Amino acid sequence: MKVFRTHRKQLIEWLFEQSQNVYTKLFKNHEAWGISRKELLTYPTSSFGRHLGEFLNKNGFELIAKVERHDAYHTLTGYGTKVEDEIALQCLCFGNGKRSLYLYGAMILGILILPDYYTYYYQSYRIGNRSNPFHQFNYKHLLHVNIDDFRDAIFSKAQRNSLIIN
């Protein structure tokens, strides 16, 4: 069963990779941030921007032009980059009111292909649904904000504990 789950996760990773460029080209018509990981790592230690840079650094990523907000969601919520975490993050964002074709596709396919994590997905949805709205922010303008203050404005203490972002 574990081998089969690994293959299902690989399928989802492949689907994410294939769809990312198409989605960015067809549906993202705003300007890219134009900020590198190296630049983010120069922000003050307690800033959201610095934490975003550390998330990117830890995972060996650079911001992807025009979808920088996705990595901002990871940083804000503490969700990892495993396949099941990516799907759970989409469920959290859906619960928070975010709507996009990509979100629907990732969430629906993820739940259908990896139903083993349904409880995790549902808990994520509920956290997003019960937290203050965060999906609509212009995160580029929030890079200097203190990350703890930002998280406190979005999530209750119980939600922060559930997200493991203390």
Image (spheres, helix red, strand yellow):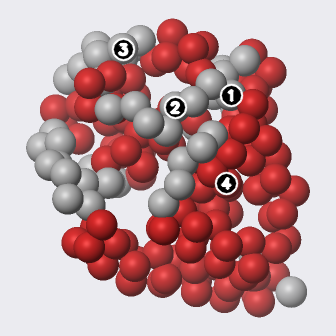
Disc on the earlier residue, 1 or 3: 1
Q: Is residue 72 left or right of residue 76?
A: left
Callout 1–callout 3 Cβ contact below 8 Å: no
Give the CA separation, mark 4 to mark 2.
14 Å
Q: Which mark is residue 145?
A: 3
Q: Which residue is mark 2?
A: 134
Q: Which residue is mark 4?
A: 91
In the image, residue 72 above or below residue 63: above
Give the CA separation, mark 3 to mark 2.
14 Å
Q: Residues within 10 Å of mark 1 (few under 14, many from 20)?
A: some
Q: Residues within 10 Å of mark 4 (few under 14, many from 20)?
A: many
* SS of the residue under disc 4: helix
Q: Nearer the viewer, mark 3 or mark 2?
A: 2
> At x 30% / y 78%, what residue is drawn?
22
Callout 2–callout 1 Cβ contact below 8 Å: yes
* SS of the residue under disc 2: loop
Disc on the earlier residue, 4 or 1: 4
Give the CA separation, mark 2 to mark 1.
8 Å
> At x 26% / y 73%, what residue is drawn?
26
* SS of the residue under disc 3: loop
Q: Is residue 155 left or right of residue 77?
A: right
Type of the residue with mark 4: Cys
Measuring from the top left, give residue 157's x and y in whole percent.
Answer: 74, 16
Q: Which mark is residue 131?
A: 1
Type of the residue with mark 3: Val
Disc on the earlier residue, 4 or 2: 4
Asked if one can make out residue 82 in the rendered structure from this viewpoint, the answer is no
Q: Residues within 10 Å of mark 3 (few under 14, many from 20)?
A: some
80 or 129: which is nearer to us? 129
Quarter of the picture holding the N terminus: bottom right
Disc on the earlier residue, 3 or 2: 2
